[in-house]
Amino acid sequence: MSKYDSPLHIVSAYASELGVTLAQKSVEGKSNEIPAVQELIKTLEISGCIVVADAMNCQIETAKAIVEAKADYLLCAKSNQQTLKADIEEYVQDDRLRSKMNSITKREKGHGRIEIRSAFTTNDVSWMPGGRQWPELKCIGAIRTHFEYKGKVTEQWHYYISSKELTANDLLHHARMEWGVETMHWLLDVRYREDYFRAQNENIQKNMNMSRKLALNLARVYKNKHAKKTPLSHIMFDCLMDPHHLLTVLGKNFSFVDVCFLSGFLSFLFPILYSISLKCRFKMSLPI
């Protein structure tokens, strides 16, 4: 059985609207994530969906894979696509041109912080020198984020390309939905303490990662359908303390045959729920 000399990296396909992980692929190094994402896209049925990816995956080949899957892409352009970013930045930062773009501004206040997000989009991409390299490119946009916290003010700009004609409100919505995958990573790292998992065997690492995500998926689907106002950690804690509730959570998502099949998996699922629940309620953790 093989071992990794470096930490295992997992590329995940996450359905932000549902809050569940659809598929994943493991790679041995972060530099291998780009081709892994392209391969993962080809295995998914994503027709009619919009795929949002981080700046690392703002690649022409990735965009082609998404379009070939009959989906649309929304990609963030940063320093790895310096020319593309510079073209969009020059357009957006021109006051005259920006005034003609579709725009929207939203303001939020919470936890002592004020956040103002402004989005700008245009479907005029014919002027872009390198626009033809990107398949089905139809829209460019930008989001300006203004933070005020404890008297300090910061501002950030992010630039985007898309194969779908988007309004400014669409851009804000889809860009923010990408944060869902960060929430999933936060749960894995903080609640499950995945970073402290020391198994070196490749199969054990993969299986444990999939099992944690399975537990999150089950709890998330139940929450979306039957307990929208209940924190995810409370649902999982209740599953730990009451086996009947655990069966109810499983039963709401599966048929009777599926529940019977999954009952044999509960002995493995319980330690996972046990660890996250103690971490959430008692600020303690046990090794998985």
Image: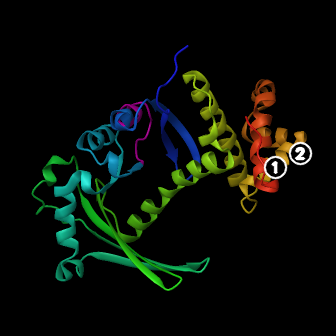
**Which kind of residue does numbered mark 1 sit on?**
Phe
Q: Residue at x 65, y 43 (%)?
A: 217
For the C terminus, the image quarter is top right
Q: Quadrant of residue 268?
A: top right
Left or right relative to 130: residue 137 = right
* Residue 251: percent from left, percent from top: 79, 38
In the rendering, at what x and y percent does residue 237 appear?
A: 81, 49
Element type where label 1 sits in the image: helix
- Element type at mark 2: helix
Coloring scheme of the render?
Answer: rainbow
The part of the image, by quadrant, that contains residue 211 is top right
Which residue, given by chain and number where applicable, does mark 1 sit on? Answer: 237
Badge 2 is on which residue?
241
Quadrant in which the N terminus appears = top right
**Which of these two is toward me, 190 or 49?**
190
Which dot marks residue 62? none
Q: Position of residue 152 (x, y in %)?
A: 46, 82
Residues at badges 2 and 1 in contact (C-beta under 8 Å)? yes
The answer to which of 189 and 165 lies nearer the viewer is: 189
Number of other residues with Cα within 10 Å of mark 1, as a class: few under 14, some 14 to 19, many 20 or more: many
Report the side of 25 relative to 132 (left or right). right
Residue type, mark 2 in image: Met
Instruction: Tell me the crowding category of disc 2: few under 14, some 14 to 19, or many 20 or more residues within 10 angstroms, Cα based.
Output: some
Q: Which residues are magenta?
A: 37-49
**Residue 38 covered by magenta stretch:** yes
Where 42 sits versus 147, above or below?
Answer: above
The relative height of residue 9 versus residue 20 in the rendered view (above or below) is above
Residue 85: say if magenta: no
| 65 lies above or below 156 | above
Tell me which residue sits at (89%, 45%) in the image. Answer: 241
| Residue sitting at x 18%, y 78% | 94
Whole-percent x, y for residue 33 in the image: 38, 37
